[in-house]
Image (spheres, helix red, strand yellow):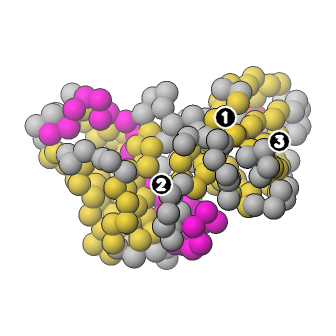
Amino acid sequence: ETGVTQTPRHLVMGMTNKKSLKCEQHLGHNAMYWYKQSAKKPLELMFVYSLEERVENNSVPSRFSPECPNSSHLFLHLHTLQPEDSALYLCASSQGALAGQDTQYFGPGTRLTVL
Amino acid sequence: QQPVQSPQAVILREGEDAVINCSSSKALYSVHWYRQKHGEAPVFLMILLKGGEQKGHDKISASFNEKKQQSSLYLTASQLSYSGTYFCGTPFGPGGYNKLIFGAGTRLAVHP
């Protein structure tokens, strides 16, 4: 399944580093999402972009900064992270159809470790 | 409000059946089911919409009872490939896009 790709797949960073996660979707979708998946916790929605406009920020700390330059690409810029931010970060995309009926397709995720 | 999934974990032998439940304290418009294998992306299984319809995908089917505000996922004659964590997601909040809140997941292990 290569509809949604994410790079890098693994990332180790120090608390003072700045890094970016990249997501690309090849499905012609209009909506893109960032999720955080921590051990023993459910998938947590972080951000939603619809037609390149951020439509949801689910109370995410400002050390996470999303960017959506076009409908195919989504970035998550990271700076001064904390060890508790270590998690699997998943990107997803969807058609942007009727709320509640839209299927989301996930990328493989970036496994982030903050030292 | 996060949907509640039960059970938390299931261990099966090949060929056995299982049921995974997803309940919400809020009225549901739809329920989305995903399966995630270890180290892989969650994979979409099916959407159940308001109306109590039952859907099927190979030997995996699901029902949606809007009165009870719950959905059940039925895995019959389980195969080794069914192993993974199953998540249900339900829409929340306003908006013309799909915001989903997911349950904690049900870990399913199928052994030979």
Q: What chain letter is assigned to the residue under label 1?
A: B
Residue B62 percent location from the top left of the image: 80, 49
Question: In the image, which residues are magenta?
Answer: A80-105
Observer-side mark, 1 or 2, equals 1
Residue A108 percent location from the top left of the image: 47, 49
Question: In screen coordinates, is B67 left or right of A110?
Answer: right
Q: Nearer the viewer, residue B41 or B53?
A: B53
Which element carries disc 1, helix, strand or loop?
A: strand
Q: Amino acid at mark 2?
A: Gly
Question: In screen coordinates, is B95 left or right of B83?
Answer: left
Task: Give the answer, above or below, for where A94 lies relative to B76.
Answer: below
* Residue appearing at x 58%, y 55% in the figure: B91
Quadrant position of residue A70: bottom left
Determine which residue is flagged by label 1: B5
Q: Amino acid at mark 3?
A: Tyr
Observer-side mark, 1 or 3, equals 1
Give whichever of discs 1 and 3 has the lower sequence position. Answer: 1
Determine which residue is flagged by label 2: A107
Cα separation, mark 1 vs mark 2, equals: 24 Å
Q: What chain letter is assigned to the residue under label 2?
A: A
Q: Are marks 1 and 2 in contact (CB under 8 Å)?
A: no
Cα separation, mark 1 vs mark 3, equals: 13 Å
Crowding at dot 1, Cα within 10 Å, few <14 / some 14-19 / many 20+, comes out as: many
Residue B88 percent location from the top left of the image: 64, 45
Crowding at dot 3, Cα within 10 Å, few <14 / some 14-19 / many 20+, comes out as: some
Determine which residue is flagged by label 3: B74
Q: Is residue A101 magenta?
A: yes
Q: Is residue A82 visible?
A: yes
